[in-house]
Image: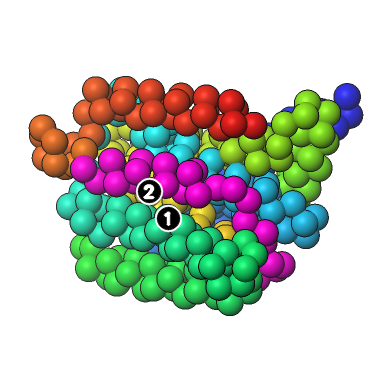
Amino acid sequence: MIEYLLFAAGLILLVKGADFLVDGSTSLAKRLGIPTLVIGLTMVAFGTSLPETFVNIFAALKGTADISFGNIIGSNMANILLILGLCAILTPLKVKHSTVWKEIPFSFLAAAMLFILADIAIIEHGQNFLFRVDGLVFLGFFIIFLYYVFEMAKKEKQDTLVVPHKHSKLAITAMIIGGLIALFLGGRWTVQGAVYIAQQIGISEYVISATIIAVGTSLPELMTSIIAARKNEIDLAVGNVVGSNIFNIFFVMGITALIAPLQVPNIITDLILLLIATFLLFIFMFIGTKHTLKRWQGITFIIFYAAYITFILIRG
């Protein structure tokens, strides 16, 4: 019973820890005079990917590669199909030109690189492992993405993200330290609980991580995007999801592979489905109202996600 409680507590700590750390880091950056647009495109996007980061770090240290891959693939599928699907049902999402032509294709590139490197690992090495050099490749693409973000920030003429509350230095310090502690404990307990639950129920660690953990670590993106959509902050709702998918593969998987070589599970079909979901998001931008994700398309995403979850549960 204690393992189930630790698992639930771990997911809660991951979400709240990311929230505290983003809030504290954003307030600190504002005090230091860093432009709010840069904060939004870096710290907030990074912050919503922190739960995946800590889960994968502990999974790598524990040698449970299935959790690492399931967490990232499941989170990215949830981001596109579940989160954008729900947001589009709430209100049609008008997507920026740069997001359609640059960020969505970049997220497709991220999924394609994971697919390619996973295949090359099997072909070249005779065994399905991602090595540290593969992690460096991911991080190289991540640096390119950061360069693009900062160049875009320079061209923006006005801030698009406002921090509504100011915090004292003590409060900022407490939020940053508390957030890091919560993420550390949350990541450790979530992985520990997932391994135990998988063993008890008799299903794979990959299934647990691609479903329960993936949705749990995607809660920051879910809440951010839904609130943004309700406030008609469409750029934030869509950009948060697409940016998070790029962070998850290029940064989180890059760091994970650097920590320890990862044995690639049987995920070729899952990676193909992720490529299809990302490509479908791009195609939907040109069907009907240009650069707009409509309600019927959101419903299509939800159906696709339900089919994906059903598939991996049946496969086991």
Residues at circles 1 and 2 in contact by the CB criterion of under 8 Å: yes
SS for tag 2? Answer: helix
Q: Main secondary structure of the magenta part?
A: helix
List the residue tagged with mark 2: 275
In the visual, does 69 lie left or right of 187? left
Q: Residue at x 69, y 54 (%)?
A: 65
SS for tag 1? Answer: helix
User: Looking at the picture, how far across and down is residue 220, in whole percent?
Assistant: 53, 39
Q: Considering only vertical position in the picture, is 7 above or below 314?
A: below
Q: Considering only vertical position in the picture, is 16 above or below 261?
A: above
List the residue tagged with mark 1: 111
Q: Residue at x 75, y 37 (%)?
A: 194
103 or 29: nearer the eye? Answer: 103
User: Looking at the picture, how far across and down is residue 215, in whole percent?
Assistant: 56, 34
User: Magenta segment, which residues?
Assistant: 254-283
Categorize mark 1 by other alpha carbons within 10 Å: few (<14), some (14-19), many (20+).
many
Q: Quadrant of residue 209?
A: top right
Q: Tell me which label, 1 or 2, sits earlier in the chain.
A: 1
- Mark 1 and mark 2: span between their CA atoms? 6 Å
Q: Residue at x 30, y 52 (%)?
A: 104
